[in-house]
Image: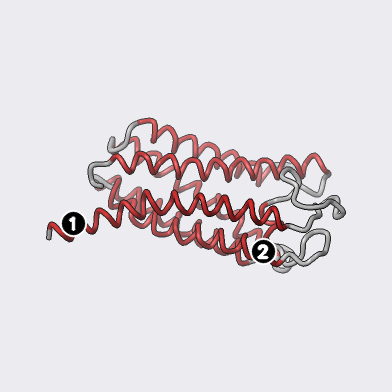
Amino acid sequence: MFKNQIIFSLNKHFILVILPRVVLVIFILLQITGMIFYPGGTLHNPDTIGYSFTENFFSDMGTYKARNSDPNYLSMIFFSFSLTLVGVTFFFYYLVLPQTLGNDRINYILTSVGTIFAFGGSICLIGTGLTPSDIVFSSHVFFANNIFHCFLITALLYTIVIFRSQLLEQKYAIGYGLFFISIFIYVGVLQFGPSVDVGQGALIFQVVAQKIIVLVFCSTIFHQTFGLRKLGKF
């Protein structure tokens, strides 16, 4: 029985600490690689060469053809694989979290509900990667937007849980709270921000906002792994 507990703890350590760190690094490297191989073109200027950090969405890398009409196979593969990998990783990450942070009945319920929404967000991550926006635009937008709608609920519930549980230092609760606020603001941008069709300034605003929220997303998960690593249960 003691041996089984050790194996279980090691598995939790791998899923909650090691795997997220490795996958986030892989995700960033794949995104950079996808940007390198992206042929070119933006929404308002199809003649640009290569990927523009301020004028191309991440999703531009996932299209069948680049915005300059050149084939975009390599970037599409890197983009699709990276989002699928992250989606599967988050599925297992949030599957295990209730066993770690649900230290009383209320927290267990909150973590379980938060995990259900995280499953939805994980499915949307995979869906975003597998639906090229130039072929199935409406499906792609549905999945891409609902990543943040789902994780908005997850972030709120887990912020409450971390504050209540006192298993992690308060800085991790504050970090998750800031994560929630960031997603809340970005959802507001999605709903009420300027349309990218308005002009170049609106496009840059939306693209930069997307880059920031993805950076916050990665940083939050990476930051939380340090708190989870310190838990005596591992």
Q: Secondary structure at mark 1?
A: helix
Mark 2 highlights which residue?
76
Q: Where is the N terminus found, in terms of image quarters?
A: bottom left
Q: Earlier in the sequence, mark 2 or mark 1?
A: 1
Q: Residue at x 82, y 52 (%)?
A: 49
Measure how far apart labels 2 and 1 are at the Cα level: 42 Å
Mark 1 highlights which residue?
5
Q: For this view, does 115 lie left or right of residue 148?
A: left
149 relative to 178, above or below: below
182 relative to 108, above or below: above
Q: Amino acid at mark 2?
A: Met
Q: Residue at x 49, y 35 (%)?
A: 178
Q: Position of residue 22 (x, y in %)?
A: 45, 52
Q: Residue at x 40, y 44 (%)?
A: 157
Q: For the residue carrying disc 1, how many other residues have a C-alpha within 10 Å: few (<14), some (14-19), or many (20+)?
A: few
Q: Position of residue 212 (x, y in %)?
A: 61, 40
Q: For this view, does 132 lie left or right of residue 185?
A: right
Residue nearer the viewer, 17 or 37: 37
User: Pointers 2 and 1 in contact (CB under 8 A)?
Assistant: no
Q: For this view, does 233 lie left or right of residue 45?
A: left
Q: Amino acid at mark 1?
A: Gln
Q: Secondary structure at mark 2?
A: helix
Q: Position of residue 223 (x, y in %)?
A: 43, 39
